């Protein structure tokens, strides 16, 4: 099993010293990507995650995606697959849209991704919390039944984001182990990892902070029930953490992932 990690200057420093085990760096093709690509690629293959279109499988304007550019980037990155969020925004829905209409739109877009990309696509579970619904305009599409239906009926693979699953379960008052157990674990190709937190009102949030003991325990349990190719740490520091703290946190987390991955 390979280990990936979000790209950051702190990760770069650790890789230059050969201080951590990382097989892939992860980055989206937006922001400072073009300026840093050569450096990233000189160090590791790149898990490409995001093309800058805020793409998800429910989007109504999939025609804006330049799939030729996407395939060129995937090839340059040597990315083994491409992950797309399983989500639909309320703003992408028309009046009177039914659950069946949503399913058909998502399935149609999945077919487009499959037909136009040169690597397998993975569908990533999106979080469903009060904060996520407000900030990202997501329509709830998070139940194990819906996720399994999409994955199995479209014959695609699953990207399990454990933090997304965790805060979804917290927001709905569900047991996280029961929730994850009901997802299509046999289809997992990659797992995303990060710690999570709450805002000042107490609502669960996808904060991408350092992993806690409960997160490692949950990961180990998931790995007993699945066989992913890659586990990816989505941590590159949070607000208020200086360079020294980020480096320390990266070393600790990647060290723990190395131990877990060896079993």
Image (tube, rainbow, N blue to C red):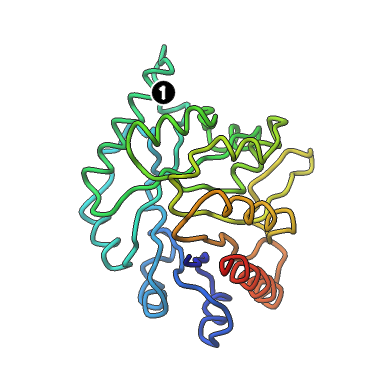
* Numbered disc 1: secondary structure: loop
Residue that appears at 62% across and 36% down: 179
Residue that appears at 51% across and 86% down: 16
Q: Nearer the viewer, residue 74 or 160?
A: 160
Q: Nearer the viewer, residue 55 or 259?
A: 259
Label 1: which residue? Answer: 93
Q: Nearer the viewer, residue 232 or 67?
A: 232
x and y percent of residue 99 in the render? 43, 18
Report the quarter where the C terminus lies. Answer: bottom right
Left or right, residue 204 beside residue 51: right
Residue 248: name its quadrant. Answer: bottom right
x and y percent of residue 195 in the render? 67, 55
Residue that appears at 46% across and 33% down: 148
In the image as oriented, which residue stretches furthest toward the top? 96
x and y percent of residue 52 in the render? 38, 51
x and y percent of residue 75 in the render? 26, 64
Left or right, residue 30 beside residue 144: left
What is the number of callouts on the image? 1
Residue that appears at 24% across and 56% down: 69
Residue 244: name its quadrant. Answer: bottom right
The crowd level at tag 1 (other Cα within 10 Å; few <14, some 14-19, many 20+) is some
Q: In this view, does 112 lie above or below 71?
A: above
């Amino acid at each position: 099993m390979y280990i990936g990690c979000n790209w950051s200057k702190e990760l770069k420093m650790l890789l230059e010293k050969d201080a951590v085990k990382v097989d892939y760096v992860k980055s989206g093709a937006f922001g400072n990507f073009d300026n840093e690509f050569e450096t990233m690629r000189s160090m590791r293959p790149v898990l490409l995650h995001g093309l800058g279109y805020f793409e998800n499988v429910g989007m109504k304007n999939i025609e804006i995606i330049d799939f030729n550019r996407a395939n060129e980037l995937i090839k340059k990155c040597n990315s083994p697959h491409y992950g797309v969020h399983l989500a639909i925004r309320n703003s992408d829905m028309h009046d009177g849209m039914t659950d069946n209409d949503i399913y058909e739109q998502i399935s149609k877009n999945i077919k487009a991704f499959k037909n136009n990309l040169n690597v397998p696509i993975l569908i990533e579970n999106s979080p469903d919390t009060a904060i996520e619904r407000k900030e990202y305009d997501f329509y709830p599409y998070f139940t194990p039944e819906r996720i399994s239906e999409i994955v199995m009926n479209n014959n695609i693979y699953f990207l399990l984001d454990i933090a997304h699953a965790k805060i979804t379960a917290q927001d709905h008052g569900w047991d996280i182990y029961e929730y994850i157990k009901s997802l299509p674990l046999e289809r997992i190709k990659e797992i995303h990892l990060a710690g999570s937190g709450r805002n000042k009102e107490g609502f669960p949030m996808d904060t991408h902070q350092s992993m806690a003991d409960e997160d490692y325990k949950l990961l180990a349990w998931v790995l007993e029930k699945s066989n992913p190719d890659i586990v990816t740490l989505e941590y590159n520091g949070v607000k208020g953490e200086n360079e020294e703290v980020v480096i320390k946190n990266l070393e600790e987390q990647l060290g723990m992932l190395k131990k877990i991955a060896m079993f």
